[in-house]
Image: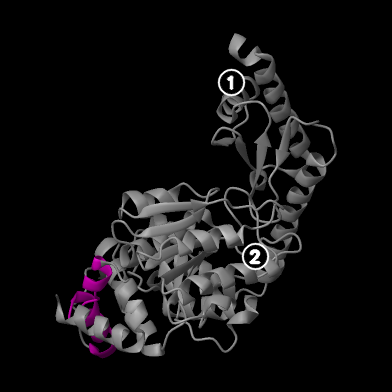
Amino acid sequence: MNPLAQQLNDVIAREQPRFAEMLSKLGQAIYFPKVGILSQSAEAKQKANVYNATIGIATENGQPMHLKVIQDKLSAFAPKDIYEYAPPAGKPELRSVWREKMLKENPSLANKTFSQPVATNALTHGLSIVADLFADAGDAVVIPDKNWENYELTFGVRRGAEIVEYPLYDGDNRFNAAGLRDALLAQKDKGKAIVLLNFPNNPTGYTPGVEEGQAIIAAIKDAADAGINVVAVTDDAYFALFFEDSLQESLFGGLCGLHERVLPIKVDGATKEEYVWGFRVGFITYGGASEACLAALEQKTIGIIRATISSGPHPSQTFVLDALKSPDFESQKAEKYAIMKGRANKVKQLLDSGKYGDDWSYYPFNSGYFMCLKLTGVDADAVRLRLLDAYGVGTIALGSTDLRVAFSCIEEPLLEDLFDRIHQAVLDVKSGAAGAN
């Protein structure tokens, strides 16, 4: 093993022995080279005041070389903030500003110890880093039965982990904390579990209430008390899009410092929060450990980034940082939130109106981009295909009964027509008209 990797492992083992046990084989082996090209280039950037001949970019007239056809479109930004490589961990100022944002929006983080966020190439990349650092073949990844399908690819296919599901809702249509607890405790023999907490949930648009959130944290603590090392990941992709009485912050704060066997990891980003999906800017943040341990985990994270994408896109990071610092940022974001909340409320009003009879019910939703219908007496994929072929409507079929509808991308005045079309497709399939065509 490389001595730098061993040094990081020794720090984590000394500071937080249980966290050291959670590392995958790759997580143990990875490190960020302190004497490599990037570190030497960083040193040269500070001290080489005559010529800096270290890093592979081209310069001209004292700034990064660039094409006028590109710079003319981006003239509001200095070439140094667009064309140079961003550091593997991300622009330092962006990381600091995002940390300030986290503290502002998550009061439970006050007086908690957590790392500086490391910039990722959006949410999926952050989850992939978690998988690389902590998931080995056969490790349990605990998720609800209504989940984002990419978890299977990221943790199951790529890393060989075992996906363990529990029902998302209990008999009262609330978050099934007892099911989560049982799924975690079932990993006693393995001694380790990775749990993914995705709120607002994709695909259902559900966020637990405060009491449910406390029950989730209690379930994780029960598993830790039982001797299970828990990597607790909050997938906060749709953070802040809370439209009703639910948790208004991430569970990450409540997990920080919860137990020596609980490693909290927050994966979030500007992608959905700031409506910049194509920018691909996200973050990964660690909590619940000493500063020395957090620094070691950060170095391993940067090592993974260096070994895969080298660094994230500099222009996107610059654009996001510029927006976060703008005096108009909060008001503009509030305007978009109001639009999204209006769409969610309109969907709920339509579904509660009785207009669609008993042809479906719907899973509780109160946040995010999506909601899920539970169809009665028809196959969800048959309805999906009928909608495409006869009504020009795209939806997502999940299993035999569930149909996911993204209200986020439908203007509020058009929502009734959307659900009318969905209802007609259900009736068509029930009557056999879809098959006749």
**Which residue matches tag 1?**
389
Q: Residue at x 39, y 58 (%)?
A: 140
Residue 239: x and y in percent read: 60, 64
Q: Residue at x 42, y 77 (%)?
A: 261
Q: Position of residue 378 (x, y in %)?
A: 64, 25
Is residue 142 one of those drawn in magenta? no
As drawn, is 8 to the left or to the right of 153?
left
In percent of the image, x 59 and y 13: which residue is there?
Answer: 435
Q: Which of 372/14 is in front?
A: 14
Whole-percent x and y of residue 151?
A: 43, 52
Q: Relative to residue 219, is residue 289 depicted above or below?
A: below
Q: Which residue is farthest top?
A: 436
Residue bearing the label numbered 2: 240
The three-letter amino acid code for the residue at tag 1 is Asp
Question: Image point 66% across, 37% down: which residue?
Answer: 374
User: Magenta span: helix, strand or loop, mainly?
Assistant: helix
- Which is more N-terminal, label 2 or label 1? 2
Horizontally, residue 383 falls left or right of residue 153, namely: right
User: How far separated are the C-alphas under marks 1 and 2?
Assistant: 36 Å
Range drawn in magenta: 25-49
